[in-house]
Every structure is written in structure tokens, then in C-alpha cells.
Amino acid sequence: MSKVEKYNPYQEMLQVLDLAAEKLGFSLNDYNTLRYPERELKVAVPVEMDDGTLKVYTGYRIQHCSSRGPCKGGIRFHPNVDLDEVKALSAWMTWKCAVVNIPYGGAKGGIEVDPSLLSTRELSRLTRRYTAAILPLLGPERDIPAPDVNTDARIMGWIMDTYSMFKGYAVPGVVTGKPIEIGGSLGRKEATGRGVSIVTDEIAFRAGIPLQKARIAVQGFGNVGGTASRLFYEKGYNVVAVSDVNVGLYNEKGLNIQEIEKYQKINKTLSGYTAKGVCEITNEELLCLDVDILVPAAMENQITKDIAVNIKAKVIVEGANGPTTTEADEILNEKGVIVVPDILANAGGVVVSYFEWVQNLQAIFWDEHEVYAMLKKIMIRSFDEVYGLAKESDVSLRVAAYMVALDRVVKAKKIRGIFP
Ligand code: GLU
């Protein structure tokens, strides 16, 4: 791939944004500011390693838009983290929060690191130093991080503690996805996967796909893909393929997800799992399987144009952020594949993050069933709005989701006006 052609997720985001603006009849003046993130912070994060050497990592926190409320979005630890990725992810958070109509703007952070190479103490030092470096941006009314790829409740606990140490008192509302013991919400860990499963039920019903007979393939077996697979399995759906970064597992008669989860917990990988009728496939083969529903729940830039031409699924539910490139999206639209876009399909995580933040601010905690019921209500309401607009305007679900989101953000911006 030449330098000019290099995949740039922020440019991909802008293309869909411009299209949605055009469909809404907006002039560039109406939304031009939303083509630029409000704040981009790049930080050097020095860490004393266990062997006494000093390593310096690069971290980012980017706030895309704060017009509708505090900025919200996860923190990713991954070797591929760079400025354009974090910029795109921050903008997707703005659209995601707007499409489900929760009172947040968008942000995202990340560190260019492979956390699997660090000890627990190194990881804690890295997290705490990074938190200190981005501290001026954070706060329950300002910017609220959460888990993303390779970060979890334990890491959110360290962020909460670091921020609170600087303040001099406990501030649970500065981060979501925390351990329950320090103010986390019931149902947050599973929320993104649960949202994906709710949206899958809705789209399958509209597309006339009987889920008890459907074949489902899920790419990614982390917090999103693993949870979605388990929930599908518990509902009796036929999950025929799953994968992690190393390998895919396929059985045309259906996989035993409970057993695979147990295996992954012990071995930290799907590699080496064996069972009757199960064969190993590549991630690329998984994406092109003859299935009814495909759930890409790994990373961005997975369904490229070369993959898109070979896709056989009728419906794609994007569990990951940005798994489909713009070129691939066009091919899928032409082929009549229905794509439920990331900003809607995987919004369950940030919806329950919102519930967690509300519980922290009010210092009152909800039962699990209250969390699930509210999540379901918001996911179905948002799905119906997007689906209805797509039909009404004769556009894809992705463009409709962006239209819903952009309209809300532009309205907020107009009411507030440009400072000074
Ligand atoms: N990282 C998740 C996402 O991409 C959750 C963000 C949040 O809860 O703030 O939606």
C-alpha cells in the first residue's frame, strides 16, 4: 500500500460525515467545526521497568466535541495506537453518544504499547503516569474515560485512584467501567456485548431472519465478541465460528461457546482448542463464511474492499469500532448486505457507562435488572429511530445513524453559538 493510500480512519469518518450532512441539507458552515477535534493531547509516558531500565511510551487523549455534555470515551492500550486512530475513535464516540441520545460528547485515549509484555506493576505505573499526564483534561464534568481494547476494570480502578489522589478525595465519577467495589455499575462489563445481542435480535426480525435457525459468525473473542457469542449461545442461536487474533474456530453445526470460554480463560488464547467437528480457520476465512449474520467485534479496518466482495453474510452487526472501510461499505451496500453500524451496534457499553456515571453522581446504585431494562429500552429506541430514518430517506443504516447523530450535535452547537 503506498503512503497516499494508507488507511486513515479519521478520513474514513469524514467521508461518512460529509455524506450525512449532504443528506440532511446542511451547508459546510453548519458542521465545519465537527470536522476538527476540539483538543488533541499527546504525552510522553516514562515507566521504570522491573529490571531497572526506563522506557518511554507515547499516549494520547483527544476530545472531539463537548457540545452535548462532558467528553466520554475509552482508553486503548495497543501497539497500533496513533494520532489518526485516536482522532477517529474520539469522533465516533461523539456520534455514538448522540445516536443513543445520552448527554455526552466524544473523546478517546490510548497508549502505543503491547500490555501483554508488561508485568502488573509495570502496567500500573504506566496507567498512573499516563493518567497524571492527561489529568488537566479529566473530571466527571469534563472528560470521563472507560475501558477499550486491552484495558479493563482493574486499570479503570488505577485511573480512579490516581485522579482521586491528586484531588485529595474519592472521585468515582471520573471513570466508568470500574470495579463494583469502588463504584462500578452492575452489568457494565457485559454491556457492549449485550447491546450487540439486542441489536442483532432487532435487525434479524426486520430482515426476516429466524434466529433459531440462523448461522452466526463472530470475529473477536474479547469483552465484546466473547460476551455477544455467549449471549447468542444462551438464547439457543447457532454460533458457527468465533476467532481471536491467533485463530478462528469453525463448526457448521455450531460451537459450544461455554466450553470455548472456559478454554480461553485458562489458555488466554483460542489456539489449540479441539472438539468434535471443529476445525481451525483464519480470520479472513471467518469473515467470508456462508453465514446469515456476521459480527466483526475485533478491530477497525477488517472488512476491506477485497474481503467485502467475498462476504456472504446477509447482515453485519459491527461490534468493533470502524471494522468496515468506506470502500468496503459501498460494495456491501451494492450487494444488498445490511450493515448495522458501529456507532449504533456497539453503543451498549457507553450507555451503561452513562448509567454508572449517573449512579456515581447520585450515590445511589441500581439492581442488575434495572440496568438491563434501561439498556434494552435505549438500544431499541435508538435502533427504531435509525431504521425508520433509513427507510424514510432511502439511505443505509450507517448514513441514517450519522444523520440522527449529526442533527443532534449541530442543533446543540447552534443553540449554544460560537464563543466568543
Ligand atoms: N470503549 C467503549 C466504546 O468504544 C466504551 C466507551 C465508554 O463507555 O465511555 O464505546
Image: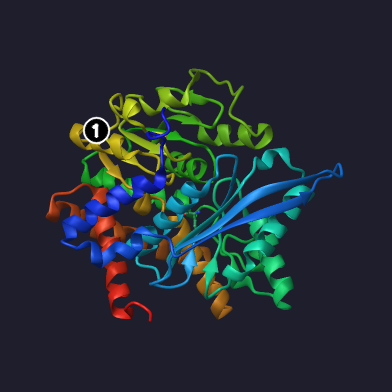
Q: Is residue 256 left or right of residue 166?
A: left
Mark 1 Cα within 10 Å, few/some/many (few <14, many 20+)?
some
Question: Left or right: 255 with respect to 202?
Answer: right
Name the residue rendered at 58%, 78% in the picture.
Answer: 363
Image position of 129 with respect to 296: above or below: below
- Number of marks in picture: 1
Residue 398 shows in this picture: yes
Q: Is residue 63 above or below residue 208?
A: below
Does mark 1 have its CB less than 8 Å from ligand 1? Answer: no
Which sits in the foreground, 24 or 29? 29
Q: In the depicted view, which residue is nearer to us: 383 or 21?
A: 21
**Residue 332, image x, y percentages:** 25, 34
Q: Residue at x 58, y 29 (%)?
A: 270
Q: Measuring from the top left, give residue 2's x and y in whole percent.
A: 41, 29
Q: Give the residue displayed 29% in from the left and 48% down from the top.
A: 15
Quadrant location, the N terminus? top left
Locate residue 66, reporting x and y percent. 43, 70
Q: Nearer the viewer, residue 186 or 135?
A: 135
Label 1: which residue? 331
- Image coords of residue 50 (percent x, y): 84, 44
